[in-house]
Image (cartoon, coloured by chain):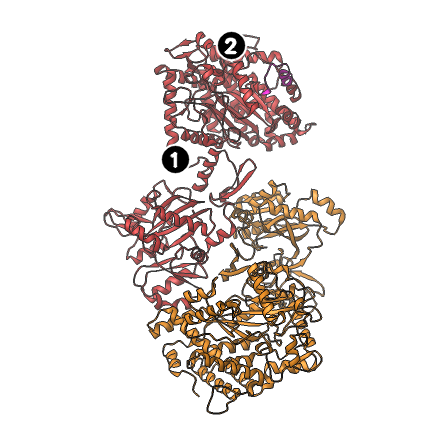
Chain colours: A orange, B red
Amino acid sequence: MGMLNREFLQFVVDHSLQKDILRGNFGLEKENNRVDGNGKLALTPHPKAFGGKMENPYIRTDFSESQIEMITPVFETIDETYHFLETIHDLVTLELQDEFLWPSSNPPALPKDEEIPIANMNDPAEDKYRKQLAEKYGRKRQLMSGIHYNFSFHEAFLRKLYEEQKANIPYKDFKDAIYLKVTRNLLRHRWLLIYLTGASPVFSKTYIEQCVQLSDHYDEESLFFPNMNSLRNSICGYRNEKPLVVSFDSVGDYVRDLQSLVQTEELLSVKEFYSPVRMKPAKGNDFLQDLLQHGIAYLELRMIDLNPLYKNGISLETMQFVHFFLVFMLLIQDEPFGEEEQKVAALNHDSLIMNGIRGRLFGEEERFVTLEEKALAFMDEMEQMFQVLKPDDQPSLRLLEQEKQKIQNPDLSYAAIVRSDIQKSSYLSYHLDRAKQYAKESKASGYQFIGYEDLELSTQLLLKAAVKRGIAFEFLDREENFVLLTKGDHKEYVKQATKTSLDSYSTVLIMENKVVTKKVLERNGIRVPNGQAYRNLRDAMADFEVYRDKPIVIKPKSTNFGLGITIFTSCFSKDDYQKAFEFAFAHDQTVILEEFMTGKEYRFLVMGDEVVGILHRVPANVAGDGIHTIEQLVNEKNKDPLRGKGYKTPLEQIQIGEVEEMFLKNQSKYRSDIPRQGEVVYLRENSNISTGGDSIDFTDDIPESYKKIAIQSAKAAGAAFCGVDMMIDHIDSEIFRRFMIHDETISIQLQKDY
Amino acid sequence: MGMLNREFLQFVVDHSLQKDILRGNFGLEKENNRVDGNGKLALTPHPKAFGGKMENPYIRTDFSESQIEMITPVFETIDETYHFLETIHDLVTLELQDEFLWPSSNPPALPKDEEIPIANMNDPAEDKYRKQLAEKYGRKRQLMSGIHYNFSFHEAFLRKLYEEQKANIPYKDFKDAIYLKVTRNLLRHRWLLIYLTGASPVFSKTYIEQCVQLSDHYDEESLFFPNMNSLRNSICGYRNEKPLVVSFDSVGDYVRDLQSLVQTEELLSVKEFYSPVRMKPAKGNDFLQDLLQHGIAYLELRMIDLNPLYKNGISLETMQFVHFFLVFMLLIQDEPFGEEEQKVAALNHDSLIMNGIRGRLFGEEERFVTLEEKALAFMDEMEQMFQVLKPDDQPSLRLLEQEKQKIQNPDLSYAAIVRSDIQKSSYLSYHLDRAKQYAKESKASGYQFIGYEDLELSTQLLLKAAVKRGIAFEFLDREENFVLLTKGDHKEYVKQATKTSLDSYSTVLIMENKVVTKKVLERNGIRVPNGQAYRNLRDAMADFEVYRDKPIVIKPKSTNFGLGITIFTSCFSKDDYQKAFEFAFAHDQTVILEEFMTGKEYRFLVMGDEVVGILHRVPANVAGDGIHTIEQLVNEKNKDPLRGKGYKTPLEQIQIGEVEEMFLKNQSKYRSDIPRQGEVVYLRENSNISTGGDSIDFTDDIPESYKKIAIQSAKAAGAAFCGVDMMIDHIDSEIFRRFMIHDETISIQLQKDY
């Protein structure tokens, strides 16, 4: 049949555009209806946690108040797009109280049409439009949900192609021509995508009465049409009332035809033009004007069903295949696509819906050709395309082979699998079970932000929180965890999750400098340990007698992470004392000697006026079993997936370096020693998480009075986000608590490494 | 005669208190009348630059609007106190427009009494009190000015003495007893201090009529009393109307007597008790109550004249001697000081004033003793005291010897020198000449803050500005130039002069990161040079062809001070390119390649909405003379006192290290080369001041349009204080200016090292 434009393909090869043609920008939009625990449409309002429906760029409502729309940003890879959608899906799921996301394009158990809540948008134009849609199509039809797949070729590809082709037209027109061609071909051959992505073969008896009456049924509630894989793409689905013909010859003609449809009130608005493919301009307020002025920026594919077989509503393979198909649409021959051809395309669409892949292909006049035959020819040519663009790329070839099998054996199609599963159960319980299973998976999805695991954990959590609240983010320096958060006009630059404009420069400088921190705390009425600063070893040595055998800590003035610190809890020699100072001076020009406060160390996480968490921090340690060496125990403990490196996990791995060996040696221990069963061996004196310490949640176990001191300390330095370290004895003794809080000197340090 | 309490002195030695007894806290207060260019009292208001008269802790007004009072903080050394006073004096002088500080205790040429402006305090109580004083004493007398010398023993000394003496009284009472004793002895022997510090022997004919009539005169306007060295300490001076007797036996008695004087309306207020020595509590609102409750904190000596021989109104030697005398007053015998003894002390005071040092010493009944005899005995005993406390301390012994000579030869006294100088000129012109000479010296005093030269220059300037505006400061970490500024309730923590709470943490983080800075500027509509960031050498090398022989700069992402930067202005080899990247990667994990913008570099200093300065910065260089080597020329240039190290001077010294040698080598030059006459040899490509660059003021030479871009750039990062570096070609060409500002890509960097 020879659809591939081999001349064009050769041109791509000749100009080394093979890689670039496969680059692109991807975005997904997905709708899910919210349902209660019985699979009935939820009649509750859109969760407040997601903020304004018009403002949150990631989480909105669609037609109905119960219909949540999830929108990813645009990414250059399918993986990023896919993972981001999954993150939104997880976040939405976690926010729902006793409700679930309905995983089918076809609606769940519905109340009467008039009881379906239209989304309350607090916007007169939006509210009016939704009311008109409800009247024109009925509310039930508007609950049909699906995936919108947004795609554009990479700018680098289009630019290079433009330059190499030396077309004598402006770049904008060149780009429009590319997208118009792809759109025409997509519309012409859309039946194949519908076949391969359709996943809504069965529907509920509560759906539109007319459709219910025409249908067959498996059981009392599960209805279907024979051979139909996608109710949503059928006349019972989300379609304009009658077929509309517009020109796809040029953007100008397209716009003109759409405008005329609106003027003749055929359409309520251009938004109502439910074409399976939309040509879209870059963001703007006036869709048609923007298209005319700035040209087509991307294509929106609207025929893809929610796939209940996947939590995300779409599989990675489908995303991949659709991309290949889009590239293929560019590389095949271009043909006229007037009224006649559009009708033929619609016929093929309906042929697929009514008769399946074995149905007739219209438009081939010579003989009776099935859709299947044509589809297999497509697959062959796509494979040929791949052999040129990405020779021997096994994953891609495997994917094509897999899709080919679905064509040859309709039982392997998504719709067939869904249909067969429903037959063993029922429409409602099948989808409800899936919904509950996916909710469970979302809840188990953990703390990480998939696709962003290269970031520090704190930044991953921050970005997830941002998505939920509808705060857009972008990376200014991803390696440094430096992001820009934007909501409306407000911009916030954030580094490592807690470094923001809420803290002032001077606050940070105060916290960086232990001498200054102490002075500032003291001045604000907070008792701090006695101590002294030394600028040289001589002065420090001169004071040896003063501190002899007192519990002291010797530490560099301005360092974090516990480097260079020595603690003497009892007797020490002059030599020990000197070494401790030398050690500390290696890290800073000024060294602090301070009385050592005993007790357990707690880190109070202060955010503004609140203590949001308290962690008891324990120095890096292992518990003996009488069998393994210290080193083996460390390695074993480090296998915990919660322990990682570079703050990407809640805890850090324990090291056995110079410092740890020295510390062991002071206890007359070596890494090869085998500790007794139950013996806890510490590898560090300091309890910083960064040096492998443990962290135990004490948020609910610390009396308010201590929290007040923590807040007061943060305030003294003017800190909005601040870790306050306190040494506290006898936290459990009520008597001690009351006594200590007033009279005790509390060792307090302020930390920016929250 | 044996005044020294040798038992006490021995006790001090036995308990190793010799050093501690000589420690103390010192503060100075000084009044100067403002005069016009003719020596007439200025009738203008107190300069606004000094802020509120009640709020500025350093610069206030005294009785008259024309009488400026300067107050130092308390220091542990005389030097610090002295230098701080000098700095205030300089700051005040520089603020005066066509006015001068009158250097004598005796008033300048005065108008009629009622024309002398009483200070307008905007405080009813203060205003009322001044009015009452004016009525009671006349305004002219209130214009008498002087030095108040505040002193306390070091707390460490008092504490140790208290502990060693094991006195069975509370510490507060012990301390009071110490100060009461010193006060009694000071009052008893004050005539000697008046002799050695008196410096107001001549006065103006415009002074109080009664005094004028009683006096002799050198010329028509210069009046005097024979033998009188201090008009201020005479009955024509600043004294209570009649001698007042109060008890100095205990604080309780003292307070009781003062209260009774106020109750009987003998005094308008306790402030009116013009005793030559006041016992003062630590700061508080109720003088007498505070004395009773908290005890004596320090002594205020009020009999010291302004010394016109010194710009500061007092010599360092005088400060030193007064301190010794105070210690001596503690170490001599204590005797009763009742009404009778107080009268004798007053007699001796007047004896000194009327007859000078050769006058009679009252209170010695056995025979006629002169003040001189007694004074010499004092000096002998002080010397003995020194031989014990500070054996063979030559400077102190020399000082004592010098004072002794003034006793033996009255012509050497300050008053005699002043008198003799006036005889050659006149009262008015002598003091006016001095005033103008001192003003000239103040103007030449330069940028530094004497006593604070260890700080960076920017911090010195900040603190001087703070003093002028009445903002108190203290050091949180002096080595780090970390200060706390306080005005009223407002506290500002400032490090290195420009690191304040006005900048947010995120602003600083943006500026630290060149990649982020560029993105932020770009987003805010500022054109920045094209460039790319590399994480490894391989990627960088892969782009060699792209940038081949273009003007580029290769630099580490996050470093200041121009380290690791290479600039290629023309052809370069692949090897050069690689080396440049290796060099930059040695400083940062990420390296930026950027198009190199030609032009001259200007640093715009932005403060809020304003460009407060523009410096054209030139890389470290020397100009050849055909004789000296590059190294010699560098050494010569470094001798400029404006060049120093560690930012304590306006410019930094030029180094010849590895970087400079490499840079010379690239020009086929060596440090031992002798450049031709007039040849300028650059030692650095980058123009940072920190690497020895020159800095030329262009503040008034840069068009507004560039300033706007600088302000816009600072605002983009949210910076309150910011150095904006711009490369600008053709700053002088009007045509270029207009063109460039709109279309040019300007290389902008934001710097915190202002």
Q: Is residue A664 visible?
A: no
Image location of residue B9, percent across then percent down: 59, 25
Q: Is residue B744 visible?
A: yes
Task: Establish if B533 lies above or below B164.
Answer: below
- Residue flagged by tag 1: what amino acid is it? Gly
**Residue at image x 34%, y 58%?**
B596
**Residue at image x 67%, y 61%?**
A681
Residue placed under numbered mark 1 in the picture: B446
Task: Establish if A723 lies above or below A675.
Answer: above
Q: Is residue B558 magenta?
A: no
- Per the image, label 1 sits on a secondary structure element best described as loop
Give the residues in magenta. Answer: B257-270
- Per the image, label 2 sits on a secondary structure element best described as loop
How packed mark 1 is, by other alpha carbons closer than 10 Å (few <14, some 14-19, many 20 or more), is: few
Q: Is residue B258 magenta?
A: yes
Residue B360's tag is: 2
Task: Establish if B273 lies above or below A423.
Answer: above
Q: Quadrant of residue B260?
A: top right
Question: Is residue B349 found left or right of A695 in the rendered image?
Answer: left
- Residue flagged by tag 2: what amino acid is it? Arg
Image location of residue B578, percent across then percent down: 37, 65
Task: Report in which chain the residue with disc 2 lies.
Answer: B
Q: Compute the Cα span from label 1 to label 2.
A: 49 Å
Question: Is residue A4 found left or right of A470 in the rendered image?
Answer: left
Task: Report in which chain the residue with disc 1 lies.
Answer: B
Image location of residue A462, percent across then percent down: 58, 59
